[in-house]
Image (cartoon, rainbow, N blue to C red):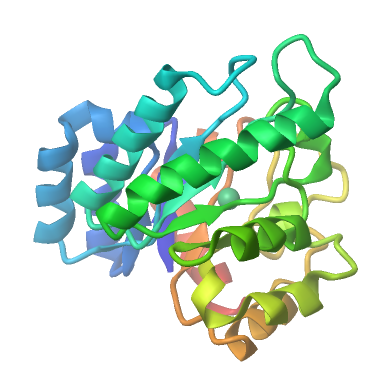
Amino acid sequence: MSLNTATVKEKCNLRQAIDLCASYGIGGIAPWRDKLQEYGVDEANRMIQDNGLRVSGLCRGGMFTLEDHLSQNILDDNKKTVDEAAAIQAECLVIVVGGLKPDSKDLAGSQMQVEDGLFKTLEYARTVKMPIAIEPLHPMYAADRACVNTLSHALDLCDQMGEGIGVAVDVYHCWWDPELESQIKRAGKNRLLAFHICDWLLETKHLLLDRGMMGDGIIDIPLIRSWMERAGFDGLKEVEIFSEDNWWKRDPEEVISVCMERSAVC
Ligand code: ZN
């Protein structure tokens, strides 16, 4: 298992999250950029390596549509994120591509801008050998976070771009997709760069901040994991739970023990 720092976002800084992982024997961590900034990238790397943790991914780069064109600012920020991922020896940089361009209804144009941004970021990432992982988000985020919403779309982009790029499969975003099994198979070992787990609560109260603990919702996580493994994925199961009214309020030690218990059976 790997702990995505979002899971303990409210109660733990990076050092506390690392200490938790170390004391519970968790194999890896996946920091968000804001957590890295708390100590600076070099110090963060030192703390992570001192505790023998793998870094299943850095969250996140992308957001290529924050402006109505692919500005130098956006590209520079993505380059910087690639460098940060390399500095902490992350296994991949997770990319959330961005939704519609500001004040626009231009889905096709936004997707073209995303392609352009991905390609330019990938060109740089190849020079430092940092794999980049497109994370397709659930279609409910198409307008504001990511206009790549299926594994199939993400893999088409990967095929177009070649080496050094793959996907992050997050069960929260992908569980509903009738093509999920076949697209995981299509991706294969080389493109499957990360596996994020949590659960979809039947009565979700907030689309962003009410993710469930594995086992509390309706996703058949063991089934999806079996598809991932059959396709060759042998990375860590990264627990990523945004839960404003529940898990973020609890004692992190409790959260971690439940995560471990649940992830062991999914
Ligand atoms: Zn995710």
**Residue 253 screen position, x and y as percent:** 38, 51
> Is residue 97 something one can see in this rendering?
no
- Asked whether, in this view, residue 58 is left or right of residue 155, the answer is left
> Is residue 38 something one can see in this rendering?
yes
Residue 167 or residue 9, whichever sits in front: 167
Quadrant in which residue 72 is drawn: top left
Name the residue rendered at 54%, 51% in the picture: 240
> Looking at this rendering, what residue extends furthest in the bottom direction?
230
Residue 70 or residue 175, whichever sits in front: 70
Quadrant in which residue 79 is drawn: top left
- Asked whether, in this view, residue 100 is left or right of residue 54, the answer is right
Above-or-below relation of 25 to 233: above
**Residue 56 screen position, x and y as percent:** 38, 61
Name the residue rendered at 70%, 71% in the picture: 221
**Residue 223 screen position, x and y as percent:** 74, 80
**Residue 241 screen position, x and y as percent:** 58, 47
Quadrant in which residue 126 is drawn: bottom left
Residue 113 or residue 205, whichever sits in front: 113
Name the residue rendered at 80%, 14% in the picture: 104
Quadrant of the image containing the C terminus: bottom right
- Asked whether, in this view, residue 11 is left or right of residue 239, the answer is left
Quadrant of the image containing the N terminus: bottom left
Above-or-below relation of 125 to 142: below
- Asked whether, in this view, residue 81 is left or right of residue 135, the answer is left
